[in-house]
């Protein structure tokens, strides 16, 4: 990238370009390529923006969904919990960004609950199969 050679790492235009490239990767289904770019943008955003800055929260929200897609469930949930916590402090209850993050967090938690239930069900089934074989 030309901007990598001419702009500082925290220059807004460079960050915007990296964000746009990460978004293009996502639209093309290239989640693994998008993740490191967005991680870099989020890291710099944490240094240059306050914790409640709307751009920073939007980036963290997006990175959380990428982590989810990459099956890094713990990081996804932790980051989305942080975004929801801050958005609850600074945005009205009916604000679309707040509601969107809350909905995503509910989705994550629901999926984790479902996956845990399936794991438990599989474990119980294996125990029953094991008991049948030992009889």
Image (cartoon, grey):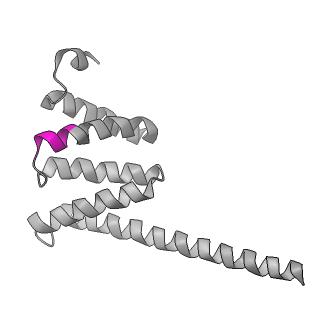
Q: From the viewer's perspective, is residue 121 above or below residue 90?
A: below
Residue nearest the observer in this picture, 99 or 44: 44
Q: From the viewer's perspective, is residue 91 above or below residue 15?
A: below
From which residue to which does the magenta span run?
44-49
Instruction: Tell me if 128 is positioned left or right of 63 in this view.
Output: right
Give the x, y percent position of residue 85: 20, 66
Give the x, y percent position of residue 89: 11, 67
Q: From where the camera sits, is residue 92 visible? A: yes
Main SS of the magenta part reads helix
Q: Residue at x 16, y 68 (%)?
A: 88
Q: Is residue 27 magenta?
A: no
In which quadrant is the C terminus drawn?
Answer: bottom right
Q: From where the camera sits, is residue 96 visible? A: no
Give the x, y percent position of residue 1: 29, 18
Q: Is residue 45 magenta?
A: yes
Q: Residue at x 20, y 37 (%)?
A: 44
Q: From the viewer's perspective, is residue 87 above or below residue 54?
A: below
Q: Residue at x 42, y 54 (%)?
A: 68
Residue nearest the observer in this picture, 51 or 17: 51
What residue occupies the far right of the structure in this picture? Answer: 135
Give the x, y percent position of residue 82: 24, 60
């Amino acid at each position: 990238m030309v901007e990598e050679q001419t702009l500082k790492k925290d220059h807004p235009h460079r960050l915007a370009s990296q964000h746009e490239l990460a978004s293009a990767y996502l639209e093309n289904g290239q989640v693994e390529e998008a993740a490191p770019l967005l991680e870099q943008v989020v890291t710099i955003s944490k240094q240059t923006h306050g914790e409640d800055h709307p751009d920073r929260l939007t980036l963290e929200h997006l990175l959380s969904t990428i982590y989810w897609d990459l099956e890094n469930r713990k990081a996804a949930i932790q980051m989305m919990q942080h975004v929801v916590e801050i958005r609850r402090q600074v945005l009205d209850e009916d604000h679309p960004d707040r509601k969107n993050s809350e909905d995503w967090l509910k989705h994550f938690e629901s999926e984790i609950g479902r996956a845990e239930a399936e794991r438990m069900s599989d474990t119980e089934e294996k125990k029953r199969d094991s008991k049948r074989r030992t009889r």
